[in-house]
Image (cartoon, rainbow, N blue to C red):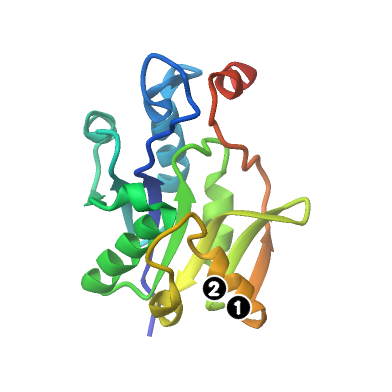
Amino acid sequence: MPVSTAGVLLAAGAGTRFAGPQHKLLAELDGESVVSRALGSLLGASLDAVAVVTGAVDVSGVLAAIGGDIAVIDNDRWESGIASSVRCAASWAARQGHDAIVVGLADQPFVTAAAWQAVADCAAPIAVGTYGGRRRNPVRLAREVWPLLPYGGDDGGRTVMRRFPEIVVPIACEGLPDDIDTVEDLRRWS
């Protein structure tokens, strides 16, 4: 039976370290918003569904401009940390009948479609993209690990990876997993 995998972009945080005139996800990077660029990479992978978890900032205008079949998952608990967004993604995926989610961050616009695809293609319970041997995003979480995910805090899937290292498979990825967290980060990459 084929495995159904959904790609999920987490875009719910407040982005408080970014002191620009708008939220960092809406800031322009080489002619497009940071979130649009990150979502474009995700859409470039061949996944069964794509969703964006939202919260602190309204990215609906960006999503409408991109078009396509992108599910929006509203995280009304976004202030409790990234783990709540991962939980929202897993709950949505369970309701939709998916077997796995591949999760990445909307403020990491340089993660490539190939990285999303490589992590998605791994059949392990948890697969994590690595760059130069360092674990980063995206991360694949199979349905069997969703009940183990924390409900709050900023660890997301890391808690499960630390508790069960034997089910984690590193996937070497090309690209840059760098975040756009500050105005300086944005300037450096523009």
Does 144 appear above or below 103? below
To which quarter of the image does residue 133 belong? bottom right
Q: Is 16 left, or right, of 79 in this rendering?
A: right
Residue at 66%, 82% (x, y): give it: 166
Q: Nearer the viewer, residue 156 or 62?
A: 156
Contact between marks 2 and 1 (CB within 8 A): the answer is: yes
- Residue 122: tell me if it is visible: no
Label 2, secondary structure: give it. helix
Mark 2 Cα within 10 Å, few/some/many (few <14, many 20+)? some
Q: Position of residue 101 (x, y in %)?
A: 41, 65
Split into 4 quadrants, where in the image is the C terminus?
A: top right
Split into 4 quadrants, where in the image is the N terminus?
A: bottom left
Does 15 appear above or below 134? above
Label 1, secondary structure: give it. helix
Residue at 23%, 69% (x, y): give it: 96
Which residue in the protein does label 1 denote?
Answer: 163
Does 15 appear above or below 33? below
Which residue in the protein does label 2 denote?
Answer: 160
Q: Is 43 left, or right, of 128 in this rendering?
A: left
Count of number-bearing discs: 2
Does 77 appear above or below 22? below
Work out which residue is located at the far bottom of the displayed protein and give it: 1
- Per the model, the C-alpha gap separating discs 2 and 1 is 5 Å
To which quarter of the image does residue 57 belong? top left
State the mark number for residue 26. Answer: none
Mark 1 Cα within 10 Å, few/some/many (few <14, many 20+)? few
- Residue 36: tell me if it is visible: yes
Q: Amino acid at mark 1?
A: Arg
Q: Amino acid at mark 2?
A: Val
Work out which residue is located at the far right of the displayed protein and give it: 132
